[in-house]
């Protein structure tokens, strides 16, 4: 803003706000869109694929997913290759997906098998392919790869989800755990994702601003350090307890979209047992998919049902109650569909966010230069060793923060 001769400031003098398209635009052909298309993205819970085709939107593209009779998953462009009918109105058959308009049948790889209105079932049907993407199933989720086939990477695995005790299982979730609101967030993916490397907000937004929304332990202002890792960024948060212990919380992000963060409602010591992926639906909508290692006896509840205000979940709160006790949804979606980066004033507490942005932008340049970006591995290798989690150990500090 401009300071006038009498010392006053006015918002009237602000230039038009703007956002950084390199961080936010995910359409095909944009820098971030091309980077994101070098990775696998979860788009649906595997259990959601039944006898009906499922519409999905990812990276600004409308798709239809289905499971054929042999169990193979197809991921098609929503428009039929014949004359553009919407394939979400199609019918799943043993051999594939049949369009409702003229009955063309495609197998899971997009090959046209039948053209009922054509002589001999379509003499030239072998020339037609329904645009499709490769799919994989892992951890109860359907992943798709939307990039160039000659650069298709291996689908990463994570050690905390690979080895299960006899009484454990993997559960898939599509409700956007960590969003603080509905499953689909009406905001850009990056302003939601970078929140993971903003641990100071846990101390303020979730703990001391209105009420303790998760654990009392998080109401202590932490000492925080950020570090670049081979796969992304990690934050180490140390909270000094009155009982002589340090409560250490480690959170990781792996480029470009993976969150490894212990749920703040549970402070049990041990490694993080959930992996989350932020799916850019398009430039202004985001969904978070999560795979969790849990005891088989654990009731199947929704994390969105955890009380955050006077015993109420976000969905039970009124608009006024959300105003009095905001959470992640209000803080992130409240920035607008795409946050205005030109209006920011980053401070020292934003060091993790700034580092994440720099690494993401560096990967954009790698793709431009024809170099594989971070965490892209063409051959399968060992599962990623998760460092995130909670630990308690004797403190080396003599001064104690007032904490439980």
Image (spheres, rainbow, N blue to C red):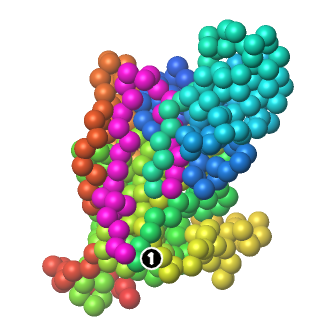
How crowded pointer 1 is (Cα within 10 Å; few <14, some 14-19, many 20+) is rated as some
Residue 48 is a magenta residue: no
Q: Is residue 157 magenta?
A: yes
Nearest the camera: 87 or 100?
100
Q: Compared to 214, does 254 lie above or below? A: above
Q: Residue at x 27, y 61 (%)?
A: 387
Percent position of residue 358, x then y: 35, 37
Q: Which residue sits at x=73%, y=72%?
A: 317
Residue lying farthest to the left in this orientation: 396
**Mark count:** 1
| Residue 321 in sight here | yes
Q: In this rendering, is residue 199 above or below 135?
A: below
Asked if residue 307 lies left or right of residue 379, the reply is right
- Residue 263: x percent and y percent? 45, 69
Quadrant assignment for the C terminus: bottom left
x and y percentages locating residue 400 in the rendered image? 27, 84
Q: Write down the quadrant of residue 364 in the picture.
A: top left
In the rendered image, which residue does mark 1 sit on?
Answer: 295
- Secondary element type, mark 1: strand
Residue at (30%, 84%) from the top-left corner? 241
Residue pictured at 51% horizontal, 56% vertical: 140
Above or below, 220 relative to 49:
below
Q: Is residue 12 visible?
A: no
Q: Which residue is more in the foreground, 300 or 319?
A: 300
The percent coordinates of residue 345 (x first, y second) are: 47, 44
**Along the viewing direction, whichever of 235 and 276 lies nearer the viewer:** 276
**Residue 372 left/right relative to 399:** right
Q: Residue furthest front?
A: 120
- Magenta part of the chain: 140-166
Looking at the rendered image, the quarter that the N terminus falls into is: top right
Q: Farthest bottom residue?
A: 243
């Amino acid at each position: 803003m401009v300071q006038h001769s009498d010392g006053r400031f006015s918002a009237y003098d602000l230039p038009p706000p703007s956002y950084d398209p390199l961080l936010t635009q995910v359409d095909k052909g944009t820098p971030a869109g091309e980077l994101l298309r070098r990775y696998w993205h979860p788009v649906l819970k595997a259990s959601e694929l039944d006898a009906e085709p499922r519409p999905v939107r990812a990276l600004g593209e409308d798709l239809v997913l289905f499971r054929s009779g042999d169990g193979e998953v197809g991921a098609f462009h929503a428009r039929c290759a014949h004359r553009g009918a919407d394939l979400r109105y199609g019918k799943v058959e043993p051999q594939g997906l049949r369009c409702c308009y003229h009955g063309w049948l495609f197998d899971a790889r997009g090959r046209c098998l039948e053209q009922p209105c054509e002589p001999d079932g379509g003499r030239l049907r072998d020339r037609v392919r329904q645009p499709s993407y490769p799919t994989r199933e892992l951890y109860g989720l359907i992943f798709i790869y939307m990039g160039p086939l000659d650069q298709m990477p291996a689908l990463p695995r994570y050690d905390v989800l690979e080895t299960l005790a006899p009484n454990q299982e993997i559960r898939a979730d599509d409700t956007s755990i960590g969003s603080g609101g509905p499953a689909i967030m009406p905001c850009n993916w990056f302003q939601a994702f970078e929140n993971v490397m903003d641990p100071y907000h846990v101390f303020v937004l979730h703990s001391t601003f209105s009420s303790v929304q998760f654990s009392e332990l998080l109401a202590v202002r932490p000492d925080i350090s950020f570090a670049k890792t081979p796969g992304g960024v990690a934050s180490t948060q140390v909270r000094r307890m009155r009982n002589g212990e340090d409560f250490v919380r480690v959170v990781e992000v792996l480029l470009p979209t993976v969150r490894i963060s212990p749920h703040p409602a549970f402070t049990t010591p041990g490694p993080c047992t959930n992996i989350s992926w932020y799916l850019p639906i398009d430039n202004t909508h985001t969904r978070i998919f999560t795979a969790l290692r849990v005891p088989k006896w654990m009731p199947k509840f929704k994390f969105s049902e955890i009380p955050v205000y006077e015993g109420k979940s976000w969905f039970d709160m009124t608009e006024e109650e959300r105003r009095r006790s905001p959470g992640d949804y209000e803080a992130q979606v409240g920035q607008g569909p795409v946050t205005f980066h030109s209006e920011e004033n980053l401070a020292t507490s934003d060091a993790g966010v700034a580092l994440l942005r720099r690494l993401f932008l560096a990967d954009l340049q790698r793709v431009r230069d024809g170099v594989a970006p971070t965490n892209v591995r063409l051959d399968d290798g060992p599962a990623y060793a998760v460092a995130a989690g909670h630990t308690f150990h004797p403190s080396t500090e003599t001064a104690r923060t007032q904490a439980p």
